[in-house]
């Protein structure tokens, strides 16, 4: 079974169980300020999981494209991916554990033809906040599953996504020890005090990774050998003149390139350009990391563009990829050219660093290499010295001062790595050429420090949580609708659309397509118009209607197979009408005074406004 066959079989199965198919949403979340990318199939459904009625009903199914960036450094093994597809079915206040588990069992055994003897499952073992999930385990037993294991919260509990919100136990399914599916039972809500309360609306959220499932069905232990990746791997083999699975490090490099260029292609297809902030920064990092490993494989210039072509071919069922093909290829080619220039600058800096060091005498250096018996120069030499195990130093007859004067330290190495894109292997090669020692331990500590900062920044985005419907966030979300309409009116640009949004309890941030800086007079007019509409005490009304009707009524939205058959449309008087699923106030009089804080460039052709309510 290939990728398309699996997706079709899954969607059709759940349609037969009265589920409605919902669209594959954008990778850029529209109504969630807390994350850069759509990270799971449930992401676009958060408002409905919290109780808002979904226009298509209580049973939903889809395949969702996702990006997860926390594992970028893990990519290179057989199963970690930055971009992946997730199959999911949902019960939004409808069926619960019994039906969800039965559907999962039926799809695995009847549709995928997996013998039940090969299936094992895990369930939640219970803790002080929630009891052991004997109910889920009992359902599995009744279906004839004998291998059932109970695990704690770190394995069999989902959420909440932020500090508070829906959460609950889950049950994971394994085929011959490999995880294939996860059913999450959202039966609790964690409140702001950290207490777990039974949810008024119980939901089911499931997830089955397309890439891993195809690999399991084909008895492959490597996702990169499935039809989702193999054409890309073949192209890398052709361009690098190297064979996959022949050399461990070269194979790892091929996987990183395949994964990163696929993810970059998908992000570019959302009209995101490489930059030094947010989604653009992740995109830039992916492309540049792929280029670094391409250099390791001795691949020629413009290889990223050729690999992106293969990605577009594989995903010919994604219309937005072929539609944005020219933009994707132009941007990836430009970024590769820019980065190769940066690498050249980095080489100059590396030479300057080397010139400031005293190289180790050739014979002594050769002795060190012989002792280490690797081309990577004395990987752990410095650590051995610090631990008092300085036998290698003694053997080479080097003093501590000589070691100090001949070391590329962690900060110097990290500068080459982070700012100039040098992979560790390349820094080691440069050190070897100059008969210098590269302090890997110190470099690792610098790397960990950077990762901690990145993690903290990411957590900052999650602070409000996916489920933040707090009063202030709700007000600011509604104010964003007013801002968008005011921009269209003052700038006389009816095709002005949102290009990104971030709302915290303190302020809103709104990105929109516009090709110049706004004047002070324009900003003043926009601010005054929003405040005028607030003072008019306009009613905020929600209506569910077919997409075609929303189009006829000129509701704002990007109509590219993005929505289901029915949508929620929010009207603010006669001033604003938008397709939306976010939280809103009932009347503009609740908002207070609107104040624009800043207007700036976000990226090419995109401006950014930050504003607050006083």
Image: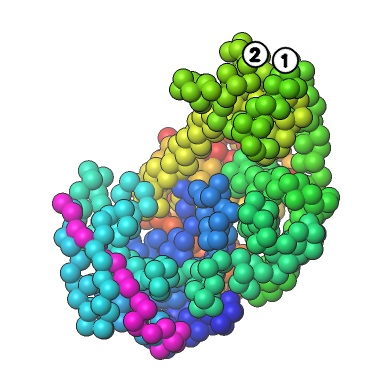
Asked whether residue 27 is drawn in magenta, I would say no
Image position of 495 with respect to 528: above or below? below
Give the residue displayed 68% in from the left and 71% down from the top. 314
* The quadrant where residue 198 appears: bottom left
* The quadrant where residue 136 appears: bottom left
Q: Nearer the viewer, residue 490 or 146?
A: 146
In the picture, the disc for residue 358 is 1
Residue stretch in magenta: 110-128
Q: Can you name the residue that lies furthest to the right here? A: 301
Q: CA–CA distance between discs 2 and 1?
A: 8 Å
In the picture, the disc for residue 402 is 2
Q: Quadrant of the N terminus?
A: bottom right
x and y, in percent, of residue 287 in the image: 69, 49
The disc, 2 or 1, on the residue closer to the chain's N-terminal end is 1
Left-right relation of 506 to 398: left
Left-right relation of 404 to 183: right
Give the residue displayed 54% in from the left and 78% down from the top. 218
Q: State whether residue 310 appears in this view.
A: yes
x and y, in percent, of residue 17 in the image: 38, 86
Give the residue displayed 80% in from the left and 41% down from the top. 340
Image position of 142 with respect to 132: above or below? below
x and y, in percent, of residue 507 in the image: 47, 39
> Dot 1, crowdedness within 10 Å: few (<14), some or many (≥20)?
some
Q: Nearer the viewer, residue 331 or 358?
A: 358
């Amino acid at each position: 079974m290939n990728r398309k066959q699996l997706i079709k079989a899954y969607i059709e199965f759940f349609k037969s169980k009265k589920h409605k198919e919902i669209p594959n949403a954008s990778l850029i979340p529209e109504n969630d300020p807390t994350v850069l990318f759509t990270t799971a199939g449930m992401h676009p459904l958060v408002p409905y999981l919290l109780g808002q009625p979904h226009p298509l009903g209580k049973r939903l199914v889809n395949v969702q494209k996702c990006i997860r960036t926390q594992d970028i450094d893990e990519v290179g093994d057989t199963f970690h991916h930055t971009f992946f597809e997730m199959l999911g079915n949902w019960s939004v206040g409808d069926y619960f554990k019994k039906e969800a588990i039965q559907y999962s069992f039926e799809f695995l055994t009847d549709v995928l033809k997996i013998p039940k003897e090969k299936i094992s499952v895990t369930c939640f073992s219970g803790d002080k906040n929630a009891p052991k999930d004997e109910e889920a385990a009992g359902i599995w037993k009744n279906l004839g599953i004998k291998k059932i294991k109970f695990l704690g919260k770190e394995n069999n509990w989902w959420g909440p996504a932020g500090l508070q919100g829906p959460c609950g136990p889950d049950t994971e399914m394994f085929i011959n020890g490999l995880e294939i599916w996860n059913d999450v039972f959202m039966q609790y809500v964690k409140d702001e005090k950290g207490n777990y309360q039974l949810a008024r609306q119980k939901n089911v959220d499931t997830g089955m990774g397309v890439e891993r499932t195809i690999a399991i069905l084909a008895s492959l232990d490597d996702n990169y050998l499935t039809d989702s990746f193999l054409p890309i791997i073949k192209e890398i083999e052709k361009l690098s003149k190297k064979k996959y699975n022949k050399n461990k490090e070269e194979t790892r490099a091929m996987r990183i390139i395949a994964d990163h260029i696929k993810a970059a292609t998908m992000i570019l297809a959302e009209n995101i350009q490489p930059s030094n902030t947010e989604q653009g920064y992740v995109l830039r990092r992916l492309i540049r990391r792929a280029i670094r490993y391409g250099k390791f494989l001795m691949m020629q210039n413009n290889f990223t563009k050729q690999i992106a072509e293969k990605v577009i071919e594989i995903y010919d069922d994604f219309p937005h990829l072929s539609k944005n093909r020219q933009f994707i290829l132009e941007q990836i080619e430009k970024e590769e050219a820019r980065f190769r220039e940066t690498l050249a600058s980095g080489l100059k800096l590396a030479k300057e660093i080397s010139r400031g060091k005293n190289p180790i005498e050739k014979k002594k250096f050769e002795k060190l290499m012989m002792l280490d018996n690797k081309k990577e120069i004395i990987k752990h030499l410095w650590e051995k010295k610090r631990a008092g195990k300085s036998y290698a130093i003694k053997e080479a007859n080097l003093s501590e001062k000589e070691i100090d004067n001949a070391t590329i330290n962690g900060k110097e190495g990290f500068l080459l790595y982070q700012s100039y894109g040098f992979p560790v292997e390349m820094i080691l090669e440069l050190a070897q050429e100059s008969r210098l020692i590269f302090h890997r331990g110190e470099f690792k500590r610098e790397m960990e420090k950077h990762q901690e900062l990145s993690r903290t920044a990411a957590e900052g985005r999650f602070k409000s949580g996916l489920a933040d419907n707090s009063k202030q966030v709700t007000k600011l979300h509604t104010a964003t609708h007013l801002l968008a309409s005011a921009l269209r009116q003052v700038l006389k640009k009816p095709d002005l659309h949102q290009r990104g949004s971030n709302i915290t309890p303190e302020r809103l941030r709104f990105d929109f397509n516009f090709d110049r800086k706004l004047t002070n007079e324009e900003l003043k007019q926009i601010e005054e118009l929003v405040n005028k509409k607030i003072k008019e005490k306009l009613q905020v009304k929600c209506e569910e209607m077919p997409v075609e009707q929303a189009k006829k009524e000129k509701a704002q939205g990007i109509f590219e197979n993005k929505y289901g058959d029915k949508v929620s449309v929010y009207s603010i008087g006669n001033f604003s009408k938008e397709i939306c699923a976010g939280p809103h106030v009932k009347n503009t009089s609740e908002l207070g005074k609107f104040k624009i804080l800043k207007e700036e460039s976000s990226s090419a052709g995109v401006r950014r406004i930050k504003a607050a309510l006083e």
